[in-house]
Image: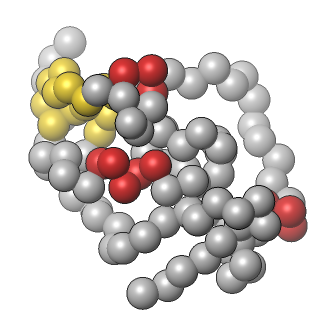
Amino acid sequence: MLHAEFRNGHKPYSGAHRSEDMAREVTHEARGPAKLDESDMGDDGMIYVCQCGLSDTKPLCDGSHNATADEDDGVVYTYENDDAEGDRRAIGELGDEE
């Protein structure tokens, strides 16, 4: 298993990444791109970008995706306050018409 730590002490991930269809509703307030540089690299020289939407260090991964490990495939979830430790609830299924 590969382990990494950012210079800021965050550990971006643990375990295998899942590739099944999973989705969650998150709130994004940024209106432009984030510029990443060497200071954003982990000790392995890689930059890990959050894809779950729950990281407190967006756009960088902080490991919050670990809270999604038991999400069911094809189900759309929302987390209270976009917080990995907040209450999670299913709000639909992928492919549902709104």
Q: Which of 34 and 44 lies nearest the eye of the viewer?
A: 44
State the count of labels.
Answer: 0
Q: Which of 88 and 19 lies nearest the eye of the viewer?
A: 88
Q: Which of 92 and 58 lies nearest the eye of the viewer?
A: 58
Which residue is at a point 28% across and 62% down the rendered structure image? 19
Query: The N terminus is located in which quarter?
Result: bottom left
Q: Is residue 22 visible?
A: yes
In the rendered image, residue 13, in percent from the top left (x then y), is placed at: 48, 66
Residue 88 picture quarter: top left
Q: How is the image coloured?
A: secondary structure
Looking at the picture, does residue 39 appear above or below residue 44? above
Q: Residue furthest bottom?
A: 1
Query: The C terminus is located in which quarter?
Result: top left
In the rendered image, residue 85, in percent from the top left (x then y), is placed at: 39, 36
Which residue is at a point 63% across and 20% down the rendered structure image? 29
Q: Is residue 62 left or right of residue 70?
A: right
Q: Residue furthest right?
A: 38
Looking at the picture, does residue 1 appear above or below residue 66? below
Which residue is at a point 29% across and 64% down the rendered structure image? 18
Q: Is residue 88 left or right of residue 95?
A: right
Q: Is residue 49 visible?
A: no
Residue 41 picture quarter: bottom right
Q: Is residue 75 left or right of residue 45?
A: left
Which residue is at a point 49% across and 56% down the rendered structure image? 63
In the rendered image, residue 89, in percent from the top left (x then y), is placed at: 20, 26
